[in-house]
Image (cartoon, helix red, strand yellow):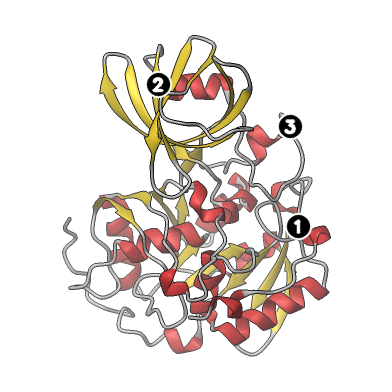
Amino acid sequence: MRTDLLDYPLPEHAIAQHPARNREDARLLVVGEDRLEHRRLPDWVELVPEGALVVLNDTRVRRARLLAHKLSGGRTEILFLSARSLGAGRSEWTVLAQAKRPLRPGTSLELGEARFTVLGRGAGPELRLQVEGVEDVDAFIERHGQMPLPPYIRRDTVEADGERYQTVFARHLGSAAAPTAGLHLTRAMLERLAQRGVRVESVTLHVGAGTFLPVRADDLDEHPMHAERFSVSAELAREIVAARARGGPVVAVGTTVVRALESARDPERPGLIRVGEGETRLLIQPGFTFGVVNALLTNFHAPRSTLLALVSAFIGLERCVEAYRAALEAGYRFLSYGDAMWLPVRASARDDTWVQQPAPRVGS
């Protein structure tokens, strides 16, 4: 796909710099097959079909942005992404770093009781960093770090971001960014879904900083897609089996859920998923055949992004362009702290092979 087809003018004033006063105060653009409808986020609960299965991403965002100091002088901002243990109080982390001068292998930094040593380069702009002096690096990061707001939020992090850049259902620590569609949901909304006979389950996909990288290649196929870890539970697999048996759609809250579920799809059992953990580099673009997800709640995404490519694949590029143009004209707020759009089950999807299938056995 030509990347320029995913480009559009996004004025600075349309990029939300702060969350709405309350999580559910967002606007909601409903993208039907033949019309666009302007609603409010709480209306979404009533728009989800009865019998549906709503899938959330229960990853928890690390306070992953730390300010360390070079032993030779100078401050360095470090964004911690992922780790592996080296034993004896040492661990190796993949990080992004910003300093006045490039950090070379052997450079030493410190923060509190921790000592950091640059080991070398990772993939793309990433660095490999050895951490010494702390047994529990996750706890150290949570104690000393700040929430890693996206680069297009051009303000300092404030205390309120610690709550609002985290979903109310976040459980498993590991993300460098929030699954932003889920930021709109409240416990009261989830309870209302349950009262309507909608099941709610979770998948875990730890969002990497690569989600913010623009596509610089002229052809989307040439874009080096970032890797993200995900985990699918047996309970979620069983819930999808049950949803298929009753003819209920699978509703993804956010593009991260789409990537996790479509990466876990079972090629031998249409509409179902495999249990387990894995790493995905799945790039979804127009022409992709969705095998698991039937409806999507999502935010408005940046130009020339893989997230916009995913939405274009879901509803078609022409419909996506039309929806984004209407949202900009109507004053919707874009990106992480912005408003949302609802891509409901298409009429053409209601006769797919997953509807009213006998419930097969769940396996890993």
User: Residue 158 bears which disc, if any?
Assistant: 3
Label 2 vs label 3, nearer the camera: 2
Q: Nearer the viewer, residue 298 or 95?
A: 95
Q: Position of residue 87 (x, y in %)?
A: 25, 19
Q: Is residue 249 left or right of residue 168?
A: left
Q: Residues within 10 Å of mark 2 (few under 14, many from 20)?
A: many
**Residue behind mark 2:** 131
Cα distance, mark 2 to mark 3? 27 Å
**What residue is at 52 percent from the left and 80 percent from the top?**
2
Q: Nearer the viewer, residue 358 or 363?
A: 363
Q: Is residue 260 left or right of residue 311?
A: left
Is residue 242 visible to us here?
yes
Among the 4 quarters of the image, the one containing residue 65: top right
- Element marked by disc 2: strand
Placement of 227 over or under 322, stated as above or below? above
Q: Position of residue 317 (x, y in %)?
A: 57, 83
User: Residue 15 bears which disc, if any?
Assistant: 1
Among the 4 quarters of the image, the one containing residue 134: top left
| Dot 1 and dot 2 residues touching (CB under 8 Å) | no
Placement of 327 over or under 90, stated as above or below? below
Is residue 52 visible to us here?
no
Amino acid type indicated by mark 1: Ile
Q: Position of residue 318 (x, y in %)?
A: 61, 87
Q: Position of residue 33 (x, y in %)?
A: 59, 87
Cα distance, mark 1 to mark 2? 36 Å
Amino acid type indicated by mark 3: Val
- First reached walking from the N terminus: tag 1 or tag 3: 1
- Element marked by disc 1: loop
Cα distance, mark 1 to mark 3? 18 Å
Q: Residues within 10 Å of mark 3 (few under 14, many from 20)?
A: few
